[in-house]
Image (cartoon, grey):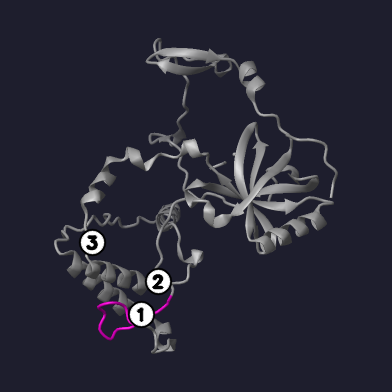
Amino acid sequence: MARAVWSGAISFGLINIPVKLYSAVTKRSVRFNQIDPSNNARIRNQRVNAESGEPVDPDELVKGYEISKGNYVVVTEDELASLQPRSTHTIDLEEFVELAEVDPIYFDGAFHVAPAPGGAKAYALLVEALAESGKVAVARFVMRSKQYVALMRPVDGRLMLSMMVYADELNPASEIPDFDDLAEVEVSEREREMAEALIESLSATFDPEAFHDSYREDVMKLIDAKASGATPALEGPSGPSDDVVVDLMAALEKSVAEAREARGRHPSKADQDDGEPEAAGSGDDRTGDDDPDTGTRGSTKDSRGTSERRSA
């Protein structure tokens, strides 16, 4: 049973809609404990003084901010508490924008926004109004003593809250010197056509179910096998290819040909029309629109004034 991680109300104008937040993402990973192989007992981490080596009681620890090497400013819990944002238990919708205006680099996790008792009618109205307008709401709210900014959008008749990072948390591309080399690069028309043909050859309708963490699955298979008493055979990881790309055009043409050959072997190829447009430099081959190959991906963390209002 899913448990709400936050409860409060959506607030915009003079409207309050009681809601609850439920985590939309659960990170999947294989967690290990450090153990002593002599008796398989777990290892405990102990806090010690870096200079004396003596253990320190956790209750005696204080927070310090390093302003220079070895020089700290101590900040008390009371001082921090006095600066924490006031929890209003409201998700304040501050403005409405086009989703296309927001770069995905700002997204950082998501929550399902569910109506709380008494809020279903106003909730449904907000969902329909957002869907009809084509806009998303920029929101601010406080959760666990931290202020967040997020986007609220309608998804299949319900609301989704996509957490966001702040602009000053992004690492600017201008600080990465490797991008400077791009200024001297020239791409020919033929190279661009072949690159576009390769993209077309690998184009498909996105299916998130096709992507999964194969490493995590393999680790769990290994653990299950060892738990049952088996001794799995180990295979070394496949290293990077030693091939060096010298001729970019040749590599593009070979990639397009291999992609088309792989698509042609797919069972759904027989169901496709013969009238599909030909990609540049492709001869008579046609591209399909089949399912993408499976792969792996990693992912999301927790993200970020009120006057009297009357309930909707």
Relative horizontal placement of residue 178, taking residue 40 as reference (left or right)? left
Horizontal relation, residue 59 to residue 228: left or right: right
Distance Cα–Cα, label 3 vs label 2: 22 Å
Locate residue 161, reporting x and y percent.
63, 50
In the depicted structure, whether residue 200 falls above or below residue 127: below
- Give the secondary structure at mark 3: loop
Q: Secondary structure at mark 1?
A: loop
Report, in whole angstroms, how far the alpha carbon at label 3 lies from the one at label 1: 24 Å
Three-letter amino acid code of the residue under disc 3 = Val
**Which residue sits at x=80%, y=45%?**
14
Please identify the dominant SS of the magenta region: loop
Expressed as whole percent of the image width and height from the top left, the position of residue 296 reads 41, 58
Q: Earlier in the sequence, mark 3 or mark 1?
A: 3
What is the count of numbered marks?
3
- Residue count near mark 2 (Cα–Cα under 10 Å), binned few <14, some 14–19, many ≥20: some
Q: Specify whether residue 23 is in view.
A: no
In front: label 3 or label 2: 3
Between 309 and 71, the one lying in front of the other is: 309
Q: Which circle's residue, 1 or 2, is located before the other in the chain?
A: 2
Asked if disc 3 and disc 2 are in contact, CB closer than 8 Å, the reply is: no
Label for residue 287? Answer: 1
Q: Which residues are magenta?
A: 278-290
Residue 13 placement: quadrant: top right
Residue under label 3, please give it: 187
